[in-house]
Image: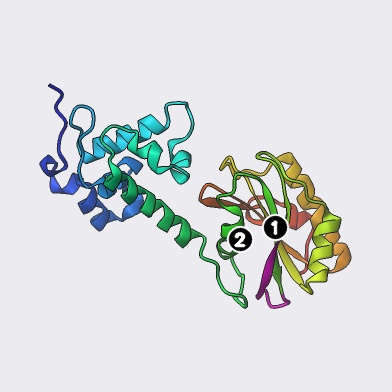
Amino acid sequence: MTYSLRVTDMPLTERPRERLMTYGAKSLATAELLAILLGTGQGPGKLSAVGLGQYILQKLGEDQRDPIALLRDVSIKELTDIPGVGPAKATSILAAIELGKRVLTARPPEGTIIDDPAVAAAVLSHDLMWQAQERFAILLLDVKHRLLGTRIISIGTATETLAHPRDIFREIIRQGAIRAIVAHNHPSGNVQPSPEDMHLTRQLLQAGQLLGIPLLDHLILGNGTHASLRQTTSLWQEFPQGD
């Protein structure tokens, strides 16, 4: 007989709920977060809730893909096909995932001052964060960095999108914006800039200098996170924007 430690058999300081209450959700492993949603365990070998959470991640990642990325778009059937996961457990997981997406993609209202890359990413998250194809977007601002709106410039394939400085600045000017932030997503979840991203950013910064329309940042979004090229590269020192 396989023995699996129950959550109630764990010391209080090691139980997922108690650890979350003491140290916060960020301190928990993904399997422990799932355990809180599952409530109880079972499945092969009468697993504990934490063990069942680990088993779910293992089953989702059997084809070597990232199980966290797969959870983002997992279906009710994919979950209930896993031994030990019935409709109640599956719907709890799906509800939590959807709630997380909605919180993350809640868009600040027009007029919000965009003074931090995280705020800009929040504005664009709904359009870019969870898309299966690359999208290129513009965040339009007035002279005081207040949000005027956003525009999707292009939609590409699963691995690339096409955007030209001419089309980008044409839309900025057409919308009457005085400042702009550009952004695109990486469906892979890797937010490191590619050589093509760097090249396009250089072109946009040069165009911003020429037209007198400062480009404040270029963001890359994916898999719940983002990167600011202004913060992580020296391009804005090479091409000052006077913003």
The answer to whether residue 213 is seen in the rendering is no
Colour basis: rainbow
Q: Which mark is residue 137?
A: 1
- Looking at the rendered structure, the kind of residue marked 2 is Leu
Q: Is residue 129 above or below residue 40?
A: below
Query: What residue is at 33 percent from the left and 53 percent from the top?
Result: 25
Query: What residue is at 20 percent from the left and 35 percent from the top?
Result: 42
The spot of residue 173 in percent (x, y) is 82, 69
Q: Quadrant of the N terminus?
A: top left
- Looking at the rendered structure, the kind of residue marked 1 is Ala
- For residue 78, side relative to residue 221 (left or right): left
Q: CA distance from mark 2 to mark 1?
A: 8 Å
Dot 2: what SS? helix
Front residue of 103 and 195: 103
> Which quadrant of the view contains residue 139?
bottom right
- For residue 186, side relative to residue 180 (left or right): left
Front residue of 64 and 212: 64
Is residue 66 on the magenta stretch? no
> Which quadrant of the view contains residue 55?
top left
Q: Which mark is residue 52?
A: none
The spot of residue 38 in percent (x, y) is 26, 46
The spot of residue 234 in percent (x, y) is 71, 52
Q: Quadrant of the C terminus?
A: bottom right
Query: What residue is at 74 percent from the left and 40 percent from the top?
Result: 195
Which residue, given by chain and number where applicable, does mark 2 sit on?
Answer: 124
Query: What residue is at 84 percent from the left and 63 percent from the top?
Result: 170
> Which quadrant of the view contains residue 196?
top right
Is residue 150 on the magenta stretch? yes
Dot 1: what SS? strand
Q: Which residues are magenta?
A: 142-151
Density class for disc 1 (Cα within 10 Å; few <14, some 14-19, many ≥20) is many
Q: Earlier in the sequence, mark 2 or mark 1?
A: 2
